[in-house]
Image: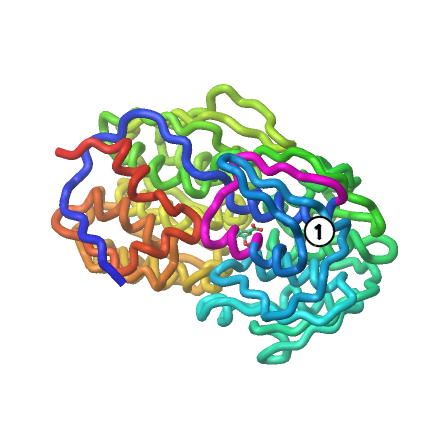
Amino acid sequence: MKELRIKKRVVNVKGELRVPSDKSISHRAVILGALATEITVVHNWLKSEDTLATLNILKALGTEVKERKDSIEIRGTGYSFEEPKGVLDAKNSGTTARLMLGVLSTQPFFSVLTGDESLRQRPMLRVVEPLRDMGATLDGRESGNKLPIAIRGGKLKGIAFFNKRASAQVKSSLLLAGLRAEDMTEVVEPVMSRDHTERMLGVFGAEVISVPEERGHLIKIKGGQELRGTDVYCPADPSSAAFACALAVLTEQSELLLKDVLINPTRDGFYRKLRDMGALVSYENEREVSGEPVADILVRGGGGLKGVKVHPEEVPSMIDEIPILAVVMALAEGRSTVKGAKELRVKESDRIRAIVENLRAMGVKVEEYEDGFEVEGRGKLKGAYIKTYGDHRIAMAFTIAGLLAEGETVIDDPECVKVSYPEFFKDLESVIEYL
Ligand code: S3P
């Protein structure tokens, strides 16, 4: 594992950047393509370790895939896969594991799904329990909570499920299983989580009902619907764009255009929160692409950022951006808090711990809560040794912190960015100007 040393301090961020395509949408595009009939062409597909884990599992299940320069072609199986000969490996990807548990639950064969050391520690009962209620047989370590998990799928029946964590992975897993179940499958969430599965199911010709209700938001799908192969265009990932955006808002003379970014309201909470802090962030050329809202995001530095509160109901719309938001908070003036974000403890690392520990190492006063943290923003950071815990978003967030800190910062495992953003360091270099 080679460390990264950051010595130079950034002055400005200038120019345009089209960051890699959205990870959540890229996973879903190939999964739905494989479940559909006929051919699906996914344009601008994100090729990263996480999405390749999904693609390789689909191939191991007998899906024919042709990889082209800017697109990927999937021959749909119409929900009819082959029994895999070996163990399926979701690597570091929670989305792969949880969505594929839903898909495999519909298949009348035996399969085993595992993942890397980090993923094998992450909770799976949140999908295993409702999938068992639908009629699938799943077993694994800790009564089915931890990978490896063995699945014997088959005939399922629809259920009504209250998704108390507002998790899109759980919702999507159940919708994908529900498509092959008898009757209706219903999922209610207290706050709407990212809705890419619902939107994309519409693009593939399925009918999904999505309506507000008393306890939050209801999604319903009727079993037995066919998906039809189609073209899907993947927009740039707002979670990846967040790093260069943060660097731009934190540097006086910056002007950066982030091209083609997904601005789905279930995902753009980070950009809205930056505006609340006083940052100059605007959406230009808003349009719709493959059922998703997209824009070019214009970011200017020199906004003079103030501390801000993130409330529990806002967390799902910025869940993956909280590490970089914490860095912005540390460089703003005044106190900032994040509450209701306990889920961060079971991401690729315990992100609350990693944020608190690394910000403290950079000289920031931070209080840790079970479900969040409080940061005292003083407008400055000192260089430090950053422990990423192999977590891509911690590595990228603290690279930005390191570029703005006095003195040297060391990132212990920069390679882990490959999970979502293989060209992260190169892209950053292309838009920053050093002192
Ligand atoms: C994802 C959902 C979120 C998010 C993850 C991707 C998805 O997880 O943190 O990076 O693609 O559905 P949860 O569903 O656990 O909130």
Q: Residue at x 71, y 51 (%)?
A: 215
Q: Residue at x 30, y 35 (%)?
A: 305
Where is residue 295 drawn, in percent x and y?
A: 50, 26
Mark 1, Cα crowd under 10 Å, few <14 / some 14-19 / many 20+, is few
Q: Label 1: which residue?
A: 215
Q: What range is drawn magenta here? A: 37-55
Where is residue 190 drawn, in percent x and y?
A: 65, 51
From this viewpoint, is residue 350 visible?
yes
Which image quadrant for residue 328?
Answer: top left
Q: Nearer the viewer, residue 119 or 405?
A: 119
Q: Residue at x 41, y 31 (%)?
A: 18
Q: Residue at x 87, y 54 (%)?
A: 183
Amino acid identity at mark 1: Arg
Q: Quadrant of the N terminus?
A: bottom left
Q: Is residue 29 above or below residue 185?
A: above
Q: Is residue 49 above or below residue 238?
A: below
From this viewpoint, is residue 195 visible?
no
Where is residue 67 drawn, in percent x and y?
A: 54, 43
Q: Nearer the viewer, residue 15 or 129?
A: 15
Horizontally, residue 232 falls left or right of residue 376, namely: right
